[in-house]
Image (tube, grey):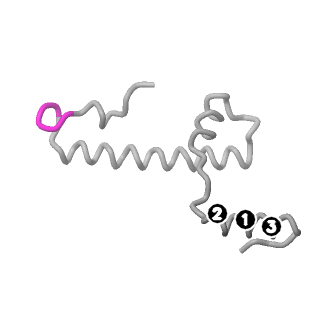
Amino acid sequence: MSAALSDRLRPGVEAAPWVIEEVRRLERELAAKQARIDELMQEYCPEEMTPDQLDTWARHQQLSPLSPEAREWIEAELAKGGRAA
């Protein structure tokens, strides 16, 4: 995959700094929308995802920013059949 467009732009040479920032903003927006599409596909039609789509989806998964204590409590409650808030 090629480098992001914003990484290929250079201030003062190919584009003004505001152009580079706008491209970066649009790249972030596009990535967020693609993540939402991947999330919906994973939920409703995972069998239709290509291996590349699955790899991209898996690379973008992150652990919750919960503390280890909170995570332990939630896991214990789920193991007991409780419902974590």
Q: Which mark is residue 72?
A: 1
Give the alpha-carbon distance from disc 1 to disc 2, as whole Å: 6 Å
Judge the density around disc 3: few (<14), some (14-19), many (≥20) Cα neighbours within 10 Å: few
Residue type beneath disc 1: Glu
In this picture, residue 44 sits left or right of residue 57: right
Neighbours of disc 2 within 10 Å: few (<14), some (14-19), many (20+): few
SS type, badge 1: helix
The residue wearing badge 3 is 76
Amino acid type at image mark 2? Pro
| Residue 40 drawn at (x, y percent) | 66, 49
Query: Can you identify the residue that label 2 sits on?
Result: 68
**Disc with the residue nearer the chain's start (2 vs 3):** 2
Whether pointer 3 and pointer 1 mark residues with C-beta atoms closer than 8 Å, the reply is yes
At x 63%, y 40%, the residue is 58
Q: Residue furthest left?
A: 12
Answer with the quarter of the image where residue 30 lies: top left
Amino acid type at mark 3: Ala
80 drawn magenta: no
Residue drawn at 16 percent across, 38 percent down: 11
Q: Quadrant of residue 59?
A: top right
Horizontal arrangement in the rendering, residue 71 relative to residue 34 (left or right): right
Magenta region: which residues?
A: 10-14
Residue at 61%, 53% (x, y): give it. 63
